[in-house]
Image (cartoon, rainbow, N blue to C red):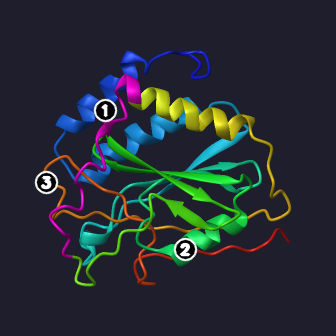
Amino acid sequence: MPFDTDTAWPAPLKTIFEVSRATLGTLEHRYYGPYDKLLNYCFDGFDYFVAPRAPPRDDTTETVDFVVYLIVMNQHRQPVFLIEPISRCVPAMMTFFIIAPLPILYSLSSIGTNMRVYIGDAATMTLNPPRVTTSPNRVLDRKYLEDAWNVDILSAEGFVKIKEIVNFIKTTPPVNVNNPCMHLQFTLTTHPLICPQDKFIASSLPESPAVARVGCRDRA
């Protein structure tokens, strides 16, 4: 069942999400596998690979700041697609823009299976929709999620949007091929105050170095 020719999500993939949604356990462990499977289905073959970041330890004191995070890279270890919201840390996105091979870097923010697509322009180093400023004490405005994550990734609309993104990634000639990244280290974040039960939100690379680290060194 190749993604390039399919017209809808395969039923077995939907089953994986449904079973994981009903499974007891931490939010990270519920959705980590399903999203990894979805990305590997979209990017099969050897031109791209999915790089996961392990969930935090159960005894971590930073549980408000962790979620599942996945990044799709090309063969040169350059990022082409992210699953995480990138609205909190513009400096970290600058790092992504510098090493990204394509003119547009897409990022998917998900709350359960509800998604929001961010579009990063590497030339202007801007983000659309723009960054949302949040309180330093991490108390989010009641309207923070309003009309934002209103597309289910498993719906027909979600499939069409993901296919549009994947087709762009696979068919767009690279504009940055001389800056391969040999090492990327990421951490993901959850917000349980706004994510009850099976819902989660990936938060990109928070400002605290104890929570997230980004490193890049050129090929030796």
Q: Earlier in the sequence, mark 2 or mark 1?
A: 1
39 vs 100: above or below? above
Amino acid type of the residue that numbered disc 2 sits on in the rendered structure: Ala
Image position of 16 (left or right of 64): right
Structural distance between the alpha carbons of marks 2 and 3 = 28 Å
Whether 147 is among the magenta residues is yes
Query: Residue at label 2?
Result: 92
Q: Position of residue 24 (x, y in %)?
A: 16, 44
- Residue 134 against residue 145 in the figure, above or below: below
In the rendered view of the protein, which quadrant contains the C terminus?
bottom right
Q: Quadrant of the N terminus?
A: top right
Q: Quadrant of residue 175?
A: bottom right
> Disc 1 designates what residue?
17
Among numbered discs 2 and 3, the one appearing first in the sequence: 2
Residues drawn in magenta: 139-157
Q: Residue at x 66, y 37 (%)?
A: 168
Residue pictured at 29% horizontal, 63% vertical = 190
How packed mark 3 is, by other alpha carbons closer than 10 Å (few <14, some 14-19, many 20 or more), is few
Q: CB of mark 1 within 8 Å of CB of mark 3?
A: no
